[in-house]
Amino acid sequence: MAAATPSADPHKLGGRVAWIALVLVALTQAMSMVDRQILAILVPRIKADLGIADAEMGLLYGTVFALFYAMFSLPLGRLADGWIRTRLLSLSIIGWSAATGLAGFANSFALLALSRLGVGIGEASVQPAGMSLLADSFPKEKRGMVAAWMAAAVALGLGGALLLGGVTADQWDSAWPGGDGAPLGLKGWQAAFLIAALPGLVIGWLLWRLPEPRRGAADGLAPHADPHPFRASWGTLHAILPVTNWITFARRRARAGEWAVNLVGLIVIAAAMYGLTAWTNSLRPNAPPLALGAFSIGGNALQWLIVGFGAYVMLNWLQSLRLGDRPAFALIAASPATVLTLTIAALQTVINYGVMGWTPAYLIQHFDQSATEVALLFGTLSAAIGIVGPMVAGPLADWAHARIGGGRVYVTLASLGISPFFGFLTYTADTLTGFYLWFCAYSIALTMWLPSIYATILDLVLPRMRGIVISFYILSMTIVGLGLGPYAVGLMSDLNGGDLASAILNLYWLGPILIVLLIALIRRLPIDEARLLERARAAGEPV
Protein backbone atom coordinates (compact mmCIF):
# COMPACT_ATOMS: atom_id res chain seq x y z
CA MET A 1 0.00 0.00 0.00
CA ALA A 2 1.40 3.38 -0.95
CA ALA A 3 1.92 6.12 1.55
CA ALA A 4 -1.01 8.51 1.55
CA THR A 5 -0.49 12.12 0.54
CA PRO A 6 -0.80 14.66 3.38
CA SER A 7 -3.63 17.14 3.40
CA ALA A 8 -3.62 19.66 0.54
CA ASP A 9 -3.86 22.38 3.19
CA PRO A 10 -1.00 21.37 5.47
CA HIS A 11 -0.34 22.77 8.92
CA LYS A 12 1.17 26.19 9.27
CA LEU A 13 3.98 25.65 11.75
CA GLY A 14 2.57 26.54 15.15
CA GLY A 15 -0.80 27.55 13.66
CA ARG A 16 -4.38 26.68 14.60
CA VAL A 17 -4.33 23.14 13.21
CA ALA A 18 -1.00 22.50 14.92
CA TRP A 19 -2.50 23.43 18.30
CA ILE A 20 -5.53 21.24 17.65
CA ALA A 21 -3.12 18.40 16.86
CA LEU A 22 -1.19 19.09 20.08
CA VAL A 23 -4.37 18.95 22.18
CA LEU A 24 -5.60 15.72 20.54
CA VAL A 25 -2.24 13.97 20.70
CA ALA A 26 -1.83 15.03 24.35
CA LEU A 27 -5.31 13.67 25.14
CA THR A 28 -4.37 10.43 23.39
CA GLN A 29 -1.24 10.24 25.54
CA ALA A 30 -3.30 10.99 28.66
CA MET A 31 -5.81 8.24 27.86
CA SER A 32 -2.98 5.80 27.24
CA MET A 33 -1.82 6.47 30.78
CA VAL A 34 -5.35 6.18 32.17
CA ASP A 35 -5.86 2.76 30.61
CA ARG A 36 -2.37 1.67 31.65
CA GLN A 37 -2.41 3.04 35.22
CA ILE A 38 -6.00 2.33 36.29
CA LEU A 39 -4.89 -1.10 37.41
CA ALA A 40 -2.83 0.49 40.24
CA ILE A 41 -5.82 1.85 42.19
CA LEU A 42 -7.74 -1.40 41.69
CA VAL A 43 -4.96 -3.69 42.97
CA PRO A 44 -6.48 -4.45 46.44
CA ARG A 45 -9.86 -5.37 44.93
CA ILE A 46 -8.38 -7.54 42.18
CA LYS A 47 -6.08 -9.30 44.64
CA ALA A 48 -9.02 -10.06 46.92
CA ASP A 49 -11.22 -11.38 44.12
CA LEU A 50 -8.64 -13.33 42.12
CA GLY A 51 -6.10 -14.31 44.83
CA ILE A 52 -3.02 -12.79 43.19
CA ALA A 53 0.15 -11.93 45.19
CA ASP A 54 2.00 -8.58 45.03
CA ALA A 55 4.81 -9.77 42.75
CA GLU A 56 2.30 -11.23 40.30
CA MET A 57 0.29 -8.00 40.36
CA GLY A 58 3.54 -6.19 39.54
CA LEU A 59 4.03 -8.62 36.68
CA LEU A 60 0.49 -7.97 35.43
CA TYR A 61 0.81 -4.19 35.81
CA GLY A 62 4.27 -4.03 34.31
CA THR A 63 5.81 -6.97 32.55
CA VAL A 64 2.90 -8.46 30.58
CA PHE A 65 1.94 -5.02 29.32
CA ALA A 66 5.56 -4.06 28.77
CA LEU A 67 6.46 -6.91 26.43
CA PHE A 68 3.75 -6.28 23.87
CA TYR A 69 3.87 -2.50 24.22
CA ALA A 70 7.59 -2.52 23.57
CA MET A 71 7.62 -5.17 20.86
CA PHE A 72 4.83 -3.64 18.75
CA SER A 73 6.21 -0.13 19.13
CA LEU A 74 8.90 -1.10 16.61
CA PRO A 75 6.70 -2.06 13.62
CA LEU A 76 4.15 0.63 14.50
CA GLY A 77 6.94 3.19 14.83
CA ARG A 78 8.15 2.16 11.37
CA LEU A 79 4.59 2.53 10.08
CA ALA A 80 4.44 6.03 11.62
CA ASP A 81 7.48 6.98 9.53
CA GLY A 82 5.69 6.15 6.28
CA TRP A 83 1.91 6.24 6.69
CA ILE A 84 -0.67 8.80 7.86
CA ARG A 85 0.08 9.36 11.53
CA THR A 86 -3.36 10.76 12.37
CA ARG A 87 -5.04 7.61 11.02
CA LEU A 88 -2.62 5.36 12.88
CA LEU A 89 -3.30 7.16 16.16
CA SER A 90 -7.06 6.97 15.59
CA LEU A 91 -7.11 3.23 14.95
CA SER A 92 -4.74 2.60 17.85
CA ILE A 93 -6.76 4.39 20.56
CA ILE A 94 -9.98 2.73 19.43
CA GLY A 95 -8.28 -0.67 19.56
CA TRP A 96 -6.74 -0.35 23.00
CA SER A 97 -9.94 1.14 24.43
CA ALA A 98 -11.72 -2.04 23.39
CA ALA A 99 -8.99 -4.08 25.11
CA THR A 100 -9.43 -2.02 28.29
CA GLY A 101 -13.15 -2.77 28.20
CA LEU A 102 -12.34 -6.49 27.99
CA ALA A 103 -10.84 -6.31 31.51
CA GLY A 104 -14.32 -5.37 32.73
CA PHE A 105 -15.37 -8.95 32.10
CA ALA A 106 -12.25 -10.61 33.54
CA ASN A 107 -12.70 -13.34 36.13
CA SER A 108 -9.15 -14.76 36.01
CA PHE A 109 -5.50 -13.75 35.75
CA ALA A 110 -5.46 -15.07 32.18
CA LEU A 111 -8.21 -12.74 30.90
CA LEU A 112 -6.67 -9.76 32.67
CA ALA A 113 -3.33 -10.64 31.06
CA LEU A 114 -5.05 -10.83 27.65
CA SER A 115 -6.54 -7.38 28.21
CA ARG A 116 -3.15 -5.96 29.18
CA LEU A 117 -1.66 -7.54 26.08
CA GLY A 118 -4.21 -5.75 23.88
CA VAL A 119 -3.70 -2.42 25.65
CA GLY A 120 0.05 -2.78 25.19
CA ILE A 121 -0.23 -3.41 21.45
CA GLY A 122 -2.68 -0.54 20.93
CA GLU A 123 -0.70 2.02 22.91
CA ALA A 124 2.55 1.18 21.14
CA SER A 125 1.99 3.75 18.39
CA VAL A 126 1.12 6.76 20.58
CA GLN A 127 4.56 8.20 21.18
CA PRO A 128 6.20 7.28 17.83
CA ALA A 129 3.32 8.63 15.75
CA GLY A 130 2.38 11.43 18.13
CA MET A 131 5.86 12.88 18.67
CA SER A 132 6.67 12.57 14.96
CA LEU A 133 3.46 14.38 14.03
CA LEU A 134 4.03 17.20 16.53
CA ALA A 135 7.68 17.61 15.49
CA ASP A 136 6.35 18.49 12.01
CA SER A 137 3.63 20.78 13.37
CA PHE A 138 5.69 23.28 15.40
CA PRO A 139 8.99 25.12 14.83
CA LYS A 140 12.09 23.22 15.89
CA GLU A 141 12.91 25.64 18.72
CA LYS A 142 9.55 24.85 20.35
CA ARG A 143 10.23 21.13 20.87
CA GLY A 144 10.77 21.53 24.60
CA MET A 145 7.32 23.10 24.87
CA VAL A 146 5.76 20.31 22.79
CA ALA A 147 7.51 17.69 24.91
CA ALA A 148 6.23 19.47 28.03
CA TRP A 149 2.65 19.01 26.85
CA MET A 150 3.26 15.32 26.28
CA ALA A 151 4.89 14.92 29.68
CA ALA A 152 2.06 16.88 31.31
CA ALA A 153 -0.40 14.56 29.58
CA VAL A 154 1.35 11.65 31.28
CA ALA A 155 0.72 13.26 34.68
CA LEU A 156 -2.87 14.08 33.75
CA GLY A 157 -3.44 10.48 32.74
CA LEU A 158 -1.81 9.05 35.85
CA GLY A 159 -3.94 11.22 38.12
CA GLY A 160 -7.05 10.73 36.01
CA ALA A 161 -6.66 6.96 36.22
CA LEU A 162 -6.70 7.07 40.01
CA LEU A 163 -9.69 9.40 40.10
CA LEU A 164 -11.72 7.47 37.57
CA GLY A 165 -10.78 4.04 38.88
CA GLY A 166 -11.03 4.75 42.59
CA VAL A 167 -14.25 6.76 42.55
CA THR A 168 -16.00 4.44 40.09
CA ALA A 169 -15.05 1.29 42.00
CA ASP A 170 -16.06 2.69 45.40
CA GLN A 171 -19.37 4.13 44.19
CA TRP A 172 -20.25 0.95 42.32
CA ASP A 173 -19.44 -1.33 45.24
CA SER A 174 -21.35 0.96 47.57
CA ALA A 175 -24.43 0.68 45.37
CA TRP A 176 -24.05 -3.06 44.67
CA PRO A 177 -21.90 -4.76 47.37
CA GLY A 178 -20.22 -7.85 45.98
CA GLY A 179 -21.81 -7.19 42.59
CA ASP A 180 -25.19 -8.52 43.78
CA GLY A 181 -27.88 -7.04 41.55
CA ALA A 182 -25.37 -4.93 39.59
CA PRO A 183 -25.67 -4.59 35.80
CA LEU A 184 -24.16 -7.73 34.26
CA GLY A 185 -23.22 -8.81 37.79
CA LEU A 186 -20.06 -6.69 37.60
CA LYS A 187 -18.02 -5.63 40.60
CA GLY A 188 -16.62 -2.13 41.08
CA TRP A 189 -13.18 -2.78 39.63
CA GLN A 190 -14.73 -4.34 36.53
CA ALA A 191 -17.03 -1.35 36.01
CA ALA A 192 -14.04 0.99 36.29
CA PHE A 193 -12.34 -0.70 33.34
CA LEU A 194 -15.48 -0.41 31.21
CA ILE A 195 -15.94 3.30 31.93
CA ALA A 196 -12.25 3.97 31.26
CA ALA A 197 -12.68 2.52 27.78
CA LEU A 198 -15.26 5.09 26.61
CA PRO A 199 -13.33 8.39 26.10
CA GLY A 200 -10.87 6.79 23.69
CA LEU A 201 -13.62 6.13 21.18
CA VAL A 202 -14.44 9.85 20.91
CA ILE A 203 -10.78 10.88 20.68
CA GLY A 204 -10.23 8.27 17.98
CA TRP A 205 -13.03 9.75 15.85
CA LEU A 206 -11.57 13.27 16.17
CA LEU A 207 -8.07 12.08 15.23
CA TRP A 208 -9.43 10.41 12.10
CA ARG A 209 -10.61 13.83 10.91
CA LEU A 210 -7.34 15.66 11.71
CA PRO A 211 -5.22 16.66 8.66
CA GLU A 212 -1.67 15.31 8.36
CA PRO A 213 1.28 17.80 8.43
CA ARG A 214 4.09 17.69 5.88
CA ARG A 215 6.93 15.50 7.12
CA GLY A 216 10.20 17.37 7.62
CA ALA A 217 8.61 20.83 7.35
CA ALA A 218 10.02 22.14 10.64
CA ASP A 219 13.54 21.05 9.67
CA GLY A 220 13.51 22.55 6.17
CA LEU A 221 13.94 19.11 4.60
CA ALA A 222 12.08 17.58 1.69
CA PRO A 223 9.51 14.95 2.72
CA HIS A 224 10.71 11.37 2.57
CA ALA A 225 8.35 9.31 0.40
CA ASP A 226 7.71 5.73 1.52
CA PRO A 227 5.92 3.72 -1.20
CA HIS A 228 5.27 0.65 0.96
CA PRO A 229 4.91 1.61 4.65
CA PHE A 230 2.83 -1.45 5.59
CA ARG A 231 5.27 -3.82 3.93
CA ALA A 232 8.13 -2.13 5.78
CA SER A 233 6.21 -2.34 9.07
CA TRP A 234 5.57 -6.04 8.56
CA GLY A 235 9.22 -6.53 7.69
CA THR A 236 10.21 -4.89 10.97
CA LEU A 237 7.98 -7.26 12.96
CA HIS A 238 9.35 -10.20 10.98
CA ALA A 239 12.91 -9.10 11.73
CA ILE A 240 12.53 -8.87 15.51
CA LEU A 241 10.62 -12.06 16.35
CA PRO A 242 12.52 -15.25 17.24
CA VAL A 243 12.97 -17.68 14.32
CA THR A 244 11.60 -15.26 11.68
CA ASN A 245 14.55 -13.00 12.48
CA TRP A 246 16.82 -15.73 11.12
CA ILE A 247 14.83 -15.77 7.87
CA THR A 248 15.46 -12.03 7.64
CA PHE A 249 19.16 -12.64 8.30
CA ALA A 250 19.30 -15.17 5.46
CA ARG A 251 17.38 -12.92 3.06
CA ARG A 252 19.72 -10.00 3.76
CA ARG A 253 22.81 -12.23 3.47
CA ALA A 254 24.03 -11.47 6.97
CA ARG A 255 27.68 -12.23 7.55
CA ALA A 256 28.92 -14.94 9.88
CA GLY A 257 29.76 -12.35 12.53
CA GLU A 258 26.13 -11.14 12.64
CA TRP A 259 24.90 -14.72 13.06
CA ALA A 260 27.42 -15.32 15.83
CA VAL A 261 26.41 -12.18 17.73
CA ASN A 262 22.75 -13.18 17.52
CA LEU A 263 23.20 -16.79 18.61
CA VAL A 264 25.65 -15.99 21.40
CA GLY A 265 23.36 -13.19 22.54
CA LEU A 266 20.41 -15.60 22.65
CA ILE A 267 22.39 -18.09 24.75
CA VAL A 268 23.54 -15.39 27.19
CA ILE A 269 20.00 -14.01 27.58
CA ALA A 270 18.53 -17.49 28.13
CA ALA A 271 21.19 -18.33 30.74
CA ALA A 272 20.63 -15.03 32.55
CA MET A 273 16.87 -15.51 32.65
CA TYR A 274 17.27 -19.07 33.95
CA GLY A 275 19.60 -17.83 36.68
CA LEU A 276 17.31 -14.95 37.66
CA THR A 277 14.31 -17.29 37.81
CA ALA A 278 16.18 -19.69 40.09
CA TRP A 279 17.36 -16.83 42.30
CA THR A 280 13.95 -15.20 42.71
CA ASN A 281 12.33 -18.60 43.27
CA SER A 282 14.76 -19.13 46.14
CA LEU A 283 13.64 -15.81 47.61
CA ARG A 284 9.95 -16.76 47.35
CA PRO A 285 9.81 -20.58 47.58
CA ASN A 286 6.10 -20.63 48.46
CA ALA A 287 4.86 -18.29 45.73
CA PRO A 288 1.66 -19.71 44.17
CA PRO A 289 1.69 -20.58 40.45
CA LEU A 290 -0.39 -18.56 38.00
CA ALA A 291 -3.13 -20.23 35.96
CA LEU A 292 -2.97 -19.44 32.25
CA GLY A 293 -5.89 -21.36 30.83
CA ALA A 294 -5.06 -25.05 31.09
CA PHE A 295 -1.47 -24.29 32.05
CA SER A 296 0.20 -22.92 35.15
CA ILE A 297 3.56 -21.20 35.55
CA GLY A 298 5.43 -19.58 38.41
CA GLY A 299 5.22 -15.80 38.53
CA ASN A 300 9.00 -15.42 38.67
CA ALA A 301 9.47 -17.70 35.66
CA LEU A 302 6.89 -15.74 33.67
CA GLN A 303 8.50 -12.43 34.69
CA TRP A 304 11.96 -13.38 33.48
CA LEU A 305 10.68 -15.23 30.41
CA ILE A 306 9.00 -12.02 29.26
CA VAL A 307 12.01 -9.81 30.11
CA GLY A 308 14.33 -12.22 28.29
CA PHE A 309 12.06 -12.26 25.27
CA GLY A 310 12.09 -8.45 25.25
CA ALA A 311 15.87 -8.35 25.52
CA TYR A 312 16.18 -10.67 22.52
CA VAL A 313 13.77 -8.47 20.56
CA MET A 314 16.04 -5.50 21.31
CA LEU A 315 19.06 -7.39 20.00
CA ASN A 316 17.18 -8.48 16.86
CA TRP A 317 15.99 -4.95 16.13
CA LEU A 318 19.45 -3.42 16.48
CA GLN A 319 20.90 -6.02 14.14
CA SER A 320 18.08 -5.62 11.61
CA LEU A 321 18.57 -1.84 11.66
CA ARG A 322 22.27 -2.26 10.97
CA LEU A 323 21.55 -4.59 8.05
CA GLY A 324 18.61 -2.66 6.56
CA ASP A 325 19.04 1.04 7.43
CA ARG A 326 22.63 2.04 8.13
CA PRO A 327 21.94 5.80 8.41
CA ALA A 328 19.33 5.18 11.12
CA PHE A 329 21.71 2.78 12.88
CA ALA A 330 24.46 5.42 12.76
CA LEU A 331 22.24 8.08 14.37
CA ILE A 332 20.55 5.82 16.93
CA ALA A 333 22.65 2.85 17.99
CA ALA A 334 26.08 4.23 17.03
CA SER A 335 25.56 7.73 18.43
CA PRO A 336 26.92 8.05 21.98
CA ALA A 337 24.53 10.89 22.82
CA THR A 338 21.48 8.94 21.64
CA VAL A 339 22.57 5.82 23.52
CA LEU A 340 23.18 7.82 26.70
CA THR A 341 19.78 9.54 26.42
CA LEU A 342 17.95 6.24 25.93
CA THR A 343 19.84 4.60 28.81
CA ILE A 344 19.00 7.45 31.18
CA ALA A 345 15.32 7.25 30.23
CA ALA A 346 15.23 3.49 30.73
CA LEU A 347 16.83 3.59 34.19
CA GLN A 348 14.74 6.52 35.40
CA THR A 349 11.51 4.81 34.35
CA VAL A 350 12.41 1.90 36.65
CA ILE A 351 11.93 4.45 39.44
CA ASN A 352 8.91 6.22 37.93
CA TYR A 353 6.91 3.09 37.19
CA GLY A 354 7.81 1.50 40.50
CA VAL A 355 6.72 4.62 42.42
CA MET A 356 3.47 5.26 40.54
CA GLY A 357 2.55 1.60 40.32
CA TRP A 358 2.61 1.04 44.07
CA THR A 359 1.96 4.39 45.78
CA PRO A 360 -1.86 4.04 45.71
CA ALA A 361 -1.59 0.64 47.39
CA TYR A 362 0.91 2.11 49.89
CA LEU A 363 -1.54 4.86 50.89
CA ILE A 364 -4.39 2.38 51.27
CA GLN A 365 -2.20 0.02 53.31
CA HIS A 366 -0.09 2.42 55.41
CA PHE A 367 -2.58 5.22 56.11
CA ASP A 368 -5.77 3.14 55.98
CA GLN A 369 -7.20 5.18 53.11
CA SER A 370 -10.10 4.09 50.93
CA ALA A 371 -9.72 3.90 47.16
CA THR A 372 -11.93 6.98 46.79
CA GLU A 373 -9.84 8.98 49.27
CA VAL A 374 -6.65 8.04 47.46
CA ALA A 375 -8.21 8.81 44.09
CA LEU A 376 -9.55 12.22 45.09
CA LEU A 377 -6.42 13.48 46.84
CA PHE A 378 -3.46 11.55 45.42
CA GLY A 379 -5.01 11.36 41.96
CA THR A 380 -5.80 15.06 41.85
CA LEU A 381 -2.37 16.07 43.13
CA SER A 382 -0.62 13.68 40.73
CA ALA A 383 -2.46 15.24 37.81
CA ALA A 384 -2.29 18.90 38.85
CA ILE A 385 1.24 19.06 40.26
CA GLY A 386 2.55 16.59 37.70
CA ILE A 387 1.53 19.06 35.00
CA VAL A 388 3.40 21.92 36.67
CA GLY A 389 6.80 20.23 36.48
CA PRO A 390 6.85 19.58 32.71
CA MET A 391 5.23 22.92 31.86
CA VAL A 392 8.03 24.70 33.73
CA ALA A 393 10.77 22.35 32.51
CA GLY A 394 9.86 22.43 28.80
CA PRO A 395 10.24 26.18 28.14
CA LEU A 396 13.16 26.31 30.59
CA ALA A 397 14.88 23.54 28.62
CA ASP A 398 14.32 25.41 25.33
CA TRP A 399 15.78 28.58 26.89
CA ALA A 400 18.83 26.73 28.25
CA HIS A 401 19.40 24.89 24.98
CA ALA A 402 19.53 28.15 23.03
CA ARG A 403 22.30 29.46 25.29
CA ILE A 404 24.38 26.49 26.49
CA GLY A 405 25.64 23.38 24.73
CA GLY A 406 23.61 20.48 26.11
CA GLY A 407 21.53 23.01 28.04
CA ARG A 408 18.34 20.99 28.08
CA VAL A 409 20.06 18.18 29.93
CA TYR A 410 20.95 20.47 32.84
CA VAL A 411 17.23 20.62 33.61
CA THR A 412 17.06 16.83 33.74
CA LEU A 413 20.22 16.71 35.88
CA ALA A 414 18.66 19.09 38.40
CA SER A 415 15.42 17.09 38.43
CA LEU A 416 17.03 13.70 39.00
CA GLY A 417 19.56 15.09 41.46
CA ILE A 418 16.93 16.62 43.74
CA SER A 419 14.06 14.14 43.51
CA PRO A 420 15.64 11.31 45.59
CA PHE A 421 15.81 13.56 48.66
CA PHE A 422 12.16 14.54 48.36
CA GLY A 423 11.29 10.89 47.74
CA PHE A 424 12.93 9.82 51.00
CA LEU A 425 11.08 12.52 52.95
CA THR A 426 7.79 11.55 51.29
CA TYR A 427 7.89 7.82 52.01
CA THR A 428 9.21 8.19 55.57
CA ALA A 429 6.56 10.73 56.61
CA ASP A 430 4.72 9.69 59.79
CA THR A 431 1.42 11.33 58.92
CA LEU A 432 -0.77 11.53 55.85
CA THR A 433 -0.46 15.32 55.90
CA GLY A 434 3.32 15.04 55.96
CA PHE A 435 3.23 12.59 53.08
CA TYR A 436 1.24 14.93 50.88
CA LEU A 437 3.26 18.03 51.76
CA TRP A 438 6.49 16.34 50.72
CA PHE A 439 4.79 14.62 47.78
CA CYS A 440 3.97 18.01 46.23
CA ALA A 441 7.66 18.91 46.03
CA TYR A 442 8.60 15.36 45.04
CA SER A 443 6.08 15.28 42.21
CA ILE A 444 7.32 18.54 40.70
CA ALA A 445 10.96 17.43 40.85
CA LEU A 446 10.19 13.94 39.54
CA THR A 447 8.30 15.19 36.45
CA MET A 448 10.79 17.83 35.26
CA TRP A 449 13.21 15.35 33.67
CA LEU A 450 11.13 14.17 30.70
CA PRO A 451 10.70 17.18 28.32
CA SER A 452 14.45 17.49 27.82
CA ILE A 453 14.72 13.78 27.04
CA TYR A 454 11.96 13.89 24.43
CA ALA A 455 13.38 17.00 22.75
CA THR A 456 16.92 15.63 22.77
CA ILE A 457 15.87 12.38 21.09
CA LEU A 458 14.01 14.28 18.35
CA ASP A 459 17.01 16.56 17.72
CA LEU A 460 19.48 13.69 17.34
CA VAL A 461 17.84 12.02 14.30
CA LEU A 462 16.41 12.94 10.89
CA PRO A 463 12.63 13.45 10.42
CA ARG A 464 12.17 10.09 8.69
CA MET A 465 13.69 8.32 11.70
CA ARG A 466 11.62 9.88 14.46
CA GLY A 467 9.06 7.10 14.61
CA ILE A 468 11.68 4.40 14.94
CA VAL A 469 13.86 6.25 17.44
CA ILE A 470 10.85 6.91 19.68
CA SER A 471 9.99 3.22 19.22
CA PHE A 472 13.42 2.24 20.46
CA TYR A 473 13.00 4.68 23.34
CA ILE A 474 9.75 2.89 24.19
CA LEU A 475 11.36 -0.52 23.80
CA SER A 476 14.31 0.23 26.07
CA MET A 477 12.43 2.13 28.76
CA THR A 478 9.57 -0.38 28.76
CA ILE A 479 11.56 -3.58 28.96
CA VAL A 480 13.88 -2.08 31.58
CA GLY A 481 11.60 0.43 33.33
CA LEU A 482 8.11 -1.00 33.20
CA GLY A 483 9.38 -4.57 33.02
CA LEU A 484 11.50 -4.27 36.17
CA GLY A 485 10.19 -1.35 38.27
CA PRO A 486 6.75 -2.60 39.43
CA TYR A 487 7.96 -6.21 39.70
CA ALA A 488 11.00 -5.20 41.77
CA VAL A 489 8.86 -3.21 44.22
CA GLY A 490 6.35 -6.05 44.48
CA LEU A 491 9.11 -8.60 45.03
CA MET A 492 10.83 -6.50 47.71
CA SER A 493 7.47 -5.92 49.38
CA ASP A 494 6.79 -9.65 49.53
CA LEU A 495 10.25 -10.24 51.03
CA ASN A 496 9.89 -7.41 53.59
CA GLY A 497 6.51 -8.41 54.96
CA GLY A 498 4.57 -5.95 52.80
CA ASP A 499 6.70 -2.86 53.57
CA LEU A 500 5.98 -0.91 50.40
CA ALA A 501 7.75 2.28 51.54
CA SER A 502 11.17 0.66 51.85
CA ALA A 503 10.55 -1.31 48.64
CA ILE A 504 9.87 1.92 46.73
CA LEU A 505 12.84 3.77 48.22
CA ASN A 506 15.23 0.93 47.39
CA LEU A 507 14.81 1.87 43.72
CA TYR A 508 16.93 4.96 44.37
CA TRP A 509 20.12 2.94 44.43
CA LEU A 510 19.99 3.79 40.70
CA GLY A 511 20.42 7.50 41.49
CA PRO A 512 24.24 7.78 41.41
CA ILE A 513 24.39 5.91 38.10
CA LEU A 514 21.91 8.34 36.55
CA ILE A 515 23.93 11.37 37.67
CA VAL A 516 27.13 10.01 36.09
CA LEU A 517 25.31 9.26 32.82
CA LEU A 518 23.76 12.74 32.71
CA ILE A 519 27.14 14.43 33.14
CA ALA A 520 28.51 12.30 30.30
CA LEU A 521 25.53 13.28 28.10
CA ILE A 522 26.05 17.00 28.75
CA ARG A 523 29.62 16.67 27.49
CA ARG A 524 28.73 14.59 24.43
CA LEU A 525 25.46 16.12 23.20
CA PRO A 526 26.86 19.24 21.43
CA ILE A 527 29.34 17.05 19.51
CA ASP A 528 26.72 14.63 18.17
CA GLU A 529 24.20 17.37 17.36
CA ALA A 530 26.79 19.22 15.28
CA ARG A 531 27.77 16.04 13.39
CA LEU A 532 24.25 14.77 12.69
CA LEU A 533 24.13 15.42 8.92
CA GLU A 534 27.79 14.44 8.51
CA ARG A 535 27.19 11.06 10.16
CA ALA A 536 24.02 10.50 8.13
CA ARG A 537 25.80 11.22 4.82
CA ALA A 538 28.72 8.98 5.77
CA ALA A 539 26.26 6.13 6.31
CA GLY A 540 24.63 6.69 2.90
CA GLU A 541 21.74 9.07 3.64
CA PRO A 542 21.03 11.48 0.71
CA VAL A 543 20.79 14.72 2.73
Image (spheres, rainbow, N blue to C red):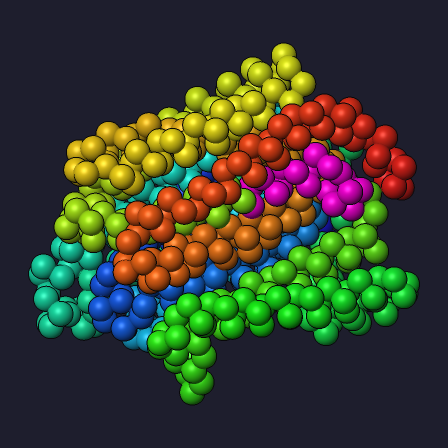
Left or right: 219, with 248 as reference point: left
Q: Where, by quadrant of the figure, is residue 133 drawn?
A: top right
Asked whether residue 514 appears in the rendered view, the answer is yes
Of helix, strand and loop, which mostly describes the magenta segment? helix
Percent x, y of residue 415: 47, 28
Residue drawn where x is 77% and y is 69% of the image: 263
Residue drawn where x is 49% and y is 56% of the image: 484
Considering the image in quadrants, where does the N terminus appear?
Answer: bottom right
Percent x, y of residue 434: 20, 33
In front of the other: 88 or 280: 280
Q: What residue span does the magenta drawing correspond to?
A: 329-346
Q: Residue furthest top?
A: 403
Percent x, y of residue 223: 75, 36
Percent x, y of residue 187: 20, 67
In front of the other: 62 or 541: 62
* Residue 332 sits inside the magenta stretch: yes
In front of the other: 508 or 194: 508
Left or right: 249, with 88 as reference point: right
Image: 83 above or below 531: below
Residue drawn where x is 63% and y is 12% of the image: 403
* Residue 221 sits inside the magenta stretch: no
Q: Residue furthest bottom?
A: 294
Q: Where, by quadrant of the figure, is residue 514 drawn?
A: top right
